[in-house]
Image (cartoon, rainbow, N blue to C red):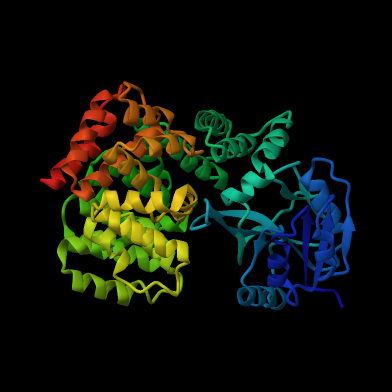
Amino acid sequence: MIPVLSVCMIVKNEEKVLNRCLDSIIGIADEIIIVDTGSSDNTKKTSFDYTDKVFDYQWNDDFSKARNFAASKARGEWILVMDADEFVDRESFITFRNQLQDRLVKENIFFVQIVNFLGEDGRSTSLNYHERLYRNDGKISYYRSIHELLKHENGVEIRGKADLQVFHSGYMSSTVNEKNKSERNLQLLKSIKEKEGIDYYFLGNEYYSLREFDKAISNYKKGYQIKENVYFEWVQKLLIRLIHCLHYTKKDQEAMDIINSCEDLFSNTVDFKFLKGKIYANEWKSGEAIKIFEFILNNKENLHAELSLDYLEQLPHRFLGELYEREGKFDLTVFHYSRFLALNENDDKIWTKLITLLANHSSKADLVQFIQKNIFSRTTMTAPRFLKILLASHNIEVQRLVIEFDFENQLTAVEQEAAKVKYMFLQKEYNLVADTIDRNMFEYLNALLLTNIFSIIDLLLLTLKLNHQKYKTYIKQLNLNPKVTSLLNLLFLNKRVKLSESEVTVFIELYKQTVALQDEELENLFLYKKSLMLNDQRMLKREINQLIKDKV
C-alpha cells in the first residue's frame, strides 16, 4: 500500500531544534526522509532515533537540488517539505493528514502558511505562504538555488492553499545571528545572473533583516519595477516591507504615498491600514490614528493580514492604549492596555504602563489588590520579572512596591539584597546605600548590578549625588553596552560633548528616574548637564519638557 504522506527535510547542525520538529510529526507522517548536508554535531544521531531513512548529501549551494534528492527517496503519495527549525501542532496535523487521505484533490501543489516567530524572544510573528506540499508523481520538482519554487515538467501546476500552519523559529534574532543566515542567503541571491522581480524582493528581505534599510529599499524598488503582475502575493509583501523601510528611514511622505495607492488595490489587507495608523501616531496626529485603529478592530473579521496577525487586533489595542493615554482618557487607556495584555501577557512595557496608570488613579490598597488578582495569578509571571516591571515605572510609589510583597521563596539571596538596597535608594537614603556597598566591597556591587534590580542607572545617580570619586573610577572601568564614554565625560567632567543616540536614551532614562525620586538638587544638575550637550536639543525637548509638565 502506498503511504499517504512523506515529510522530507534537509538538515545541517540542527541538534538544538530537531527533536521539537520530529516530535511534532512522528507517528502522523507515514514516513520521514532526512537528508544531512554535512552536520558536525549530533543531528544525524538524533535523526536515526526517529527514522531509518537518513541520507548523506554533498552540499553544492543549491537548495532545490538537495530538496529534489530528498524527494527521490520518498514513497508517499504526497510530499510535505519541512525544515528542522519548524514544527506543527500535532492535533491539527492529524486532521490535515486525514483530510489529505479522504478527499479527492484536483490540486497538485499547495501553499502552506508559515508562522514566523521574530525578535529576541519570538513574541511577535509574521506570516507568509510557501509551496511546501505537492503530489509525488515524479513530474513536480523544485527549481531556483535559494527561495526555491515548485514546477511541473509539463507546466500543469494546479495550486491551492492547504489547511495547515507550520511554525518557524528560524528568524528569531539569536538563531539568525548564530547561523549567519542573511550573509549566506545574500551570496546565493547575488550569484543569480538573470534576476527576476522576486529575486530583488528576496534580496530586499535579507538587507531588511540586517537593518540595512537603504539597500533594502533599492532592491524592493527594482523588484517592483520589473514585476509581471501587481497581484502576485510577493508583490504585496514587497510593498508592505518597502513601507516599513521608508518609515524606519524617516521617509514617511513617500511611505504614505504608497499606502494611499495600495489601499484601493488591496482594500481588505490590514497591513496598509495599520501602517498608516502607525505613521499618524508617530507624527502625533492622534485623531487620525485613533480612527484607523478603531476601524481595524471594528472590521477585523473582514480584513486579512499579509505579514502579521498582530495587525488585526493585538497591536491596534496597544496603539490605542498609548494614544488615549496621550489624550488623558484614563478609562479607554486601561481598556485597551488590558485587551492587549489579554492577547499578549508577555509585554512587560505595557504591564508597567498599566500599573503606573492605576497607581496614579487609585489607592495603594486597590493597586495591590489588582496586582494580586491579575498579575500574580499568571503562570508566566516570575518574581524577578515582576520586580523589573515595577522598577521600569517612573512613579516612585510603584517602584517602592518592591518590598510590598513576599518574594523570599522566589528570589535568590542576591536579588533579595538588591531589592533592599534599591528601596533604600528610592527612600533617598544615599549615604546608607553607599555605606552598604563600601562595607561589602565591589564584588558585592557587581552582584547587585547583575540583577538589574539595583541598576547602573541607580549607581550613576548615586555617584552624581555624592560626587563619589571611587564610584566614578569603577563605572569607567565597566564594560558597558552600549558604550557611554561621551555621556560619562558629560556627567563627571562637565565636558561639552555630542552624545550618540544610545547615550541620549540613557541620559533621558537618568533624568526620568531623577524626576521619579523628586530630588530637586539632581534635577537642577541634569538641566545644567543638558545645557552642555552639543546635540540638537530637539532630540530631548519633547521628553524632558513633558516630564517637567507632568511634575507641575
Residue 137 image offset from top left, x and y in percent: 83, 61
**Which residue occupies 78% across, 55% down?**
11
Q: Quadrant of the N terminus?
A: bottom right
Residue 325 can be seen, yes or no? yes
Above or below for 390 versus 271: below
Residue 480 image offset from top left, x and y in percent: 48, 39
Left or right: where 155 falls relative to 509: right
Above or below for 280 versus 417: above
Going by the picture, which residue comes out furthest to the front? 439
Residue 194 image offset from top left, x and y in percent: 71, 29
Residue 344 can be seen, yes or no? no
Q: Quadrant of the C terminus?
A: top left
Above or below for 366 versus 168: below
**Which residue occupies 42% across, 68% down?**
383
Residue 106 image offset from top left, x and y in percent: 69, 65
Residue sitting nearer the eye, 267 or 469: 469
**Which residue occupies 37% across, 68% down?**
342
Residue sitting nearer the eye, 318 or 280: 318
Residue sitting nearer the eye, 284 or 381: 381
Going by the picture, which residue comes out furthest to the left? 552
Left or right: where 103 falls relative to 500: right
Above or below for 148 versus 300: above
In terms of image quadrants, where is residue 358?
bottom left
In terms of image quadrants, where is residue 368?
bottom left
Left or right: where 142 falls relative to 303: right
Left or right: where 99 falls relative to 325: right
Q: How many marks?
A: 0
**Which residue occupies 33% across, 56% down?**
422
